């Protein structure tokens, strides 16, 4: 059963569902038009532009299209379609889409609830440095949701997220530290210090 941190996880889902932050610019015909339309609130035009790009394999557009289906922007809300487009982007390595898929499986939104599948997608996003994914993984390791309880791993995840300014993660790290031995804390700190985001030197 989810523990006391489940409410915080559901709040993260609401935040993630608002759409993604600007990422590295993608050079592709229609991308600037799609982003400009989205930022102006012209969701119908943004949807059309993103969909054309997404159907041609543009992973960032697939992520944006998933968010539009999830939020009902320019199209009726459709969690099944949101999952489909998030998955396409996630399979191409888009960390935010991996995080969104984790949230969908965690909450059973548009897919059957599956904590093990949520852990899989959160782990991929966390490896790429997504602080919210690191935080949620910390919760799951602390409470044994979809994984066996692992205090060292929970501490590592909370510590990594806290280092990026996640205040809830800092609280989680302090909470889990109170349940750990000095040796476990030292191990967790060593792992966190040696950690590097996937794909970065």
Image (spheres, helix red, strand yellow):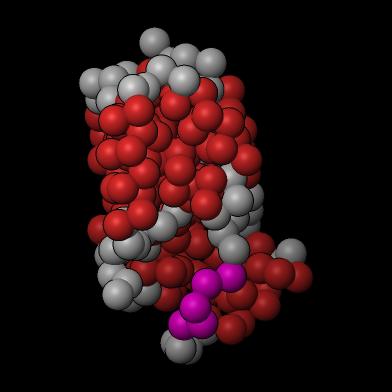
Start-end of magenta stretch? 22-26
Q: Is residue 61 above or below residue 140?
A: below
Q: Position of residue 69 (x, y in %)?
A: 52, 50
Image quadrant in which you'd find residue 60: bottom left
Q: Nearer the viewer, residue 76 or 163?
A: 163
Position of 110 compared to 198: left or right? right
Which residue is located at x 28 percent, y 25 percent? 150
Position of 179 compared to 194: left or right? right
Which residue is located at x 58 percent, y 23 percent? 7
Q: Quadrant of the C terminus?
A: bottom left
Q: Nearer the viewer, residue 7 or 4?
A: 4
Q: Quadrant of the N terminus?
A: top left
Q: Is residue 113 above or below residue 101?
A: above
Residue 105 is at least partly visible in this image: no
Q: Main secondary structure of the magenta part?
A: loop
Image quadrant in which you'd find residue 80: top left
Which residue is located at x 29 percent, y 20 percent? 149
Count of marks, rendered view: 0
Instruction: List the single residue furthest toward the top.
Output: 1
Q: Is residue 99 above or below residue 183?
A: below
Does the magenta-highlighted stretch encompass residue 23? yes
Q: Nearer the viewer, residue 60 or 49?
A: 60
Which residue is located at x 52 percent, y 29 percent? 174
């Amino acid at each position: 059963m989810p523990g006391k941190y489940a409410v915080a996880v559901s709040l993260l889902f609401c935040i993630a569902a608002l759409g993604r932050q600007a990422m590295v610019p993608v050079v592709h015909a229609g991308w600037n038009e799609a982003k400009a339309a989205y930022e102006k609130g012209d969701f119908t035009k943004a949807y059309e532009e993103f969909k054309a790009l997404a159907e041609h394999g543009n992973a960032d557009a697939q992520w944006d299209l998933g968010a539009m289906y999830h939020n009902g922007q320019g199209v009726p809300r459709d969690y099944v379609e949101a999952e489909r487009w998030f998955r396409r982007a996630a399979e191409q390595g888009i960390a935010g889409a991996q995080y969104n898929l984790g949230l969908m499986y965690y909450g059973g939104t548009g897919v059957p609830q599956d904590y093990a599948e949520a852990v899989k997608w959160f782990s991929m996003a966390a490896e790429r440095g997504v602080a919210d994914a690191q935080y949620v993984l910390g919760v799951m390791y602390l409470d044994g949701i979809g994984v066996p309880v692992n205090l060292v791993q929970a501490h590592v995840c909370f510590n990594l997220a806290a280092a990026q300014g996640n205040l809830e993660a800092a609280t989680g790290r302090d909470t889990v530290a109170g349940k750990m031995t000095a040796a476990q804390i030292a191990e967790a700190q060593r792992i966190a210090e040696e950690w590097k985001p996937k794909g970065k030197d």
